[in-house]
Image (spheres, helix red, strand yellow):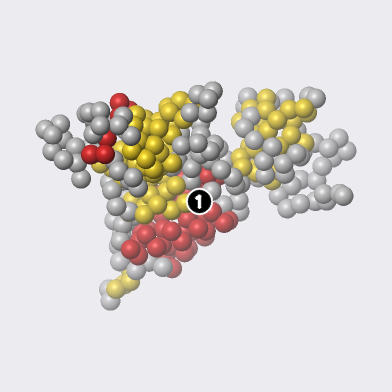
Amino acid sequence: MSRGHRPGHRRRGREGSSSPPSGERVLVLPGEEIDSHGLKPGPGTYRVGGKVYASVLGLLSPRPPLIQVVALSGRYIPHPHDVVLGIVTDVQTTFWLLDIGAPRWAPLHMTGTPWQVDVGETDRFLRVGDAVVVEVESLEATGRIGVTMNGEQLGKLEGGTIVHISPARVPRVVGRAGSMIQTITEHTGAKLAVGQNGRIWVSGSPEAIRRVSEVLRMIDEDGQRAGLTERVESYLLATMPTSDRGPEETPHESAHRDSPDEDVPPPPAVDEGADIEEGPEESGSEPP
């Protein structure tokens, strides 16, 4: 059965290749042949007999020297240096087991934290259900995912709410050069920590959390459409809390800086105002 001409695709020439102009977003299907233009197969693609095919439903994204397809949905696949939000699911004598939304759980060893943790005292620092920001440190051949809490903007999250979106939508949440996350924080006053695994921590007033959650739902559902930033800003302006004196001013929150292009999943943003706990004092006081 012929595939026909699908929205987001260019019509193919006689040789079956596609050469979208710069800036056009091309949707490809699993198993669809793509013109690599001499680039090597990257994430979301595979090669058979010298030809390159898409392995997932997603957007074609040439990134020399690789050609890749950014998946529109699916389970989070960890990569080294990803910053992710994890939930503690088990506490052992020397490590905590984290659910980071990957096919396997990730152990966080007590030496991978900024705290001075004694053997058997791990439950003084993190308990089941606690949320943390960690970095993927290593991926072993056995499937084990090594993570660390040592680093800037990593640590335990206090309060707030975690919203789940598709990991493929994370670049749209950040936006080009941080434009989207800046728009969200400026118009809501909320604090955000964005994980590459599609988990986003939101802290603020109940109304701010509600508005941010609605924006994230919009991005998750319509992330592939153009003009998304404008639609998000229109929604935030229309729902801005008002008083007898008119629209209330919301405090400006620092946006994540140096975010890469939207088409490639960037290092996740952790808003500079996020309430990340640095751990108990070395004096031996009990952690919260």
Q: Can residue 278 be seen in this view?
A: no
Q: How crowded is mark 1: few (under 14 residues within 10 Å), some or many (20 or more)?
A: some
Which residue is painted at 60% across and 47% down in the image?
A: 73
User: Which one is nearer the viewer's eye here, 116 or 45?
Assistant: 116
Which residue is painted at 74% across and 34% down in the image?
A: 53
Above or below 281: residue 131: below
Above or below 236: residue 58: above
Q: What element carries label 1?
A: loop
The image position of residue 227, as x and y in percent, is 56, 55
User: Which one is nearer the viewer's eye here, 271 or 120?
Assistant: 120
The image position of residue 38, as x and y in percent, is 72, 25
Which residue is painted at 42% across and 48% down in the image?
A: 200
User: Which one is nearer the viewer's eye here, 180 or 213?
Assistant: 213
Residue 25 is left or right of residue 16, and the answer is left
**Residue 136 location, quadrant:** top left
In the picture of the structure, the residue carrying the numbered disc 1 is 165
The image position of residue 85, as x and y in percent, is 40, 42
Which residue is painted at 28% across and 48% down in the image?
A: 158
Kind of residue at disc 1 = Ile
